[in-house]
Image: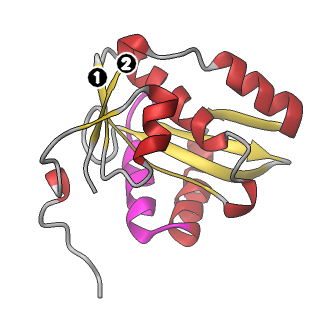
Amino acid sequence: MSDMLVKLYDLPEYAPLLATLEKEHAITIRPLIAAEKHLVENFARDKFSPYWGSEVSIACSHQPIGCFIAVHDNHIVGFACINATMKGFFGPTGVLPEYRGKNIGAALCLYSMHKLKEQGYGYGIIGGVGPKEFYAKIVGATEILDSTPGVYKGLIRVK
């Protein structure tokens, strides 16, 4: 899975998408609060991957916190991180299967990319991308040639 590059200076606005999520589905996107760190770590680890739980922990160790959550009815239904794997990187990100198709992933991605831009980055990297077409559509991401395995080279995998 290759990496993708995003021009942060050419992003669509995220406010309309967040407003639609709130109005149509009662879902909010926001930075997590430090006291919620353990909840989001567990969510990422248990619902997606132990590696992702570790990356949530790193994203939460920065100021400002680099982890954002989608909340419905006081429950986490999705998350996204920035500056976890490497500085300027987006990911990991995940949305519960039963909440997919509501643009939560798109909102988390777009919101996160704007946060990278606010921190002074000109470009963002989406590491180890699965759905290339999704990221191309949402944030205009383009594939970085010869980026597999990229920064993940030598990652220890548990068997």
> Which is more toward the observer, 136 or 28?
136
* Image position of 97 with respect to 36: above or below: below
What residue appears at the point 37 percent right and 31 percent down from the top-left corner? 141
Q: What secondary structure is found at the residue carrying circle 2?
A: helix
* Image position of 5 with respect to 98: above or below: above
Residue 91 located left or right of residue 111? left
Residue 8 place in picture, x, y as percent? 37, 18
What residue appears at the point 53 percent right and 28 percent down from the top-left corner? 110
> Which is more toward the observer, 94 or 52?
94
Mark seen at residue 123: 1
Number of residues whose C-alpha sits closer than 10 Å to that of mark 1, classed few (under 14), some (14–19) or many (20 or more): some
Residue 61 located left or right of residue 106? left
Q: Which residue is mark 2?
A: 8
Residue 98 place in picture, x, y as percent? 75, 61
In the image, residue 63 lies in the stretch drawn in magenta: yes
Q: Which residues are magenta?
A: 48-64
Query: Residues at badges 1 and 2 in contact (C-beta under 8 Å)?
Result: yes
Name the quadrant containing residue 25.
top right
What residue appears at the point 68 percent right and 62 percent down from the top-left corner? 97
